[in-house]
Amino acid sequence: MSSIPPPTEAPVPVGADVPLRRPGAGRAVAVLALVAVAALIPLLGPRAALEGTGEAAAPGVGVIALLRTVLFAALCVQAGEVFGRFLARRVDPLREPPATWSAYVPWAGFAAALGLASVVASGNLIPHSMAALDIGGLGGTRDGMLALVEVNGFLFAGLCARTRRPATALAPLSAVAVAEALRAHPAAEDTALLGSGLTLIHLTCAALWVGGLVYVLRTTHAWRTSAPEAGTALLGRYARVAALLLAAITATGVCSTLRRMPPGTVVDQLTTTAYGRALLAKVLLVAVVAGLALAARLRLRRAEGRERAYAPARAEVVVLAVVVAVSAALTALPVPIRW
């Protein structure tokens, strides 16, 4: 009697649903820790940076920095999602994208912009009652008008995200970026228009860089079983664009620094002023991010083991979240005096 061969398992077709492991408690703890750090930096960072400098902080500087952190994060995530969807369609136009975050994120930005507008309406003080707010006076000042533009920008961005063309949210988000760039450079400042232009380019490139990476990693995670090769190709396409964005961020950042800190005083002000200390921390963090991005790019060039590029890319997102918080704290600190 001939021996009966042992039964073999049927091959799993490509794209078939495979049961996935549920994320463990470790990942949830890591996310909560990241959120806590991102909140503590704007709340406590400005006070720490001001220690021993002799500079006076604006009232409620920690709250303002926290609100601006939420505003920047919302701008990054929604703009980056539109950018990331564009890249994903170029790689695989038929592949199902991950669930959108743009239906919810702009409302966080709207709440933060509303909080910042209430600060402006109370004379740049943290309001403790509705009686302290002069809502009608917002339209009569430059800062009030810019605050209203940011509030309405996130409102319309949230509405656009729920339409059949979510990419139209880029128009109101662009208005938010322009308003933020103008707010950072008062009209009385020397060459204010040049400063606003540099800030607009810097903020736009940063939003696409940070938010784009978040969406790309979410997409590669969603495609990890059905189309891992497409996910790797998407990360590679993003890496090429990110290199140009980083170059633009670096160039505009250096130019903006030299506008506010003359070359002969940069080294001294980086350690003796609150603005300089926060800027130094941001530069060091961006250097770490650049190193992680380079590591991911080098791993993508290898024929084997390209999936190892995801580890430095995920670490890059974590450090970028801290960079966003430090950048928000930087905007709340007093600008260094030119001498």
Image (cartoon, grey):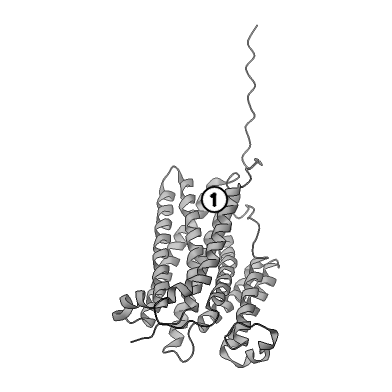
Name the residue at 52% across, 54% down: 234
Name the residue at 42% across, 44% down: 303
Coordinates of residue 286 in the picture (x, y in percent): 42, 65
Say whether residue 90 is visible: no
Q: Closest to the observer: 332 or 290? A: 332
Where 318 falls versus 149 (above or below)?
A: above
Numbered disc 1: secondary structure: helix
Within 10 Å of disc 1 (Cα), the crowding (few <14, some 14-19, many 20+) is: many
Residue at the far top: name it: 1
Residue at the far front: name it: 52
As shown in the figure, which amino acid type bears the numbered disc 1?
Gly
Total labels drawn: 1
Q: On the rendered image, what quadrant is the N terminus found in?
A: top right
Coordinates of residue 288 in the picture (x, y in percent): 40, 60
Quadrant in the picture for residue 180: bottom right
Say whether residue 127 is visible: yes
Q: On the rendered image, what quadrant is the C terminus found in?
A: bottom left
The residue beneath circle 1 is: 231
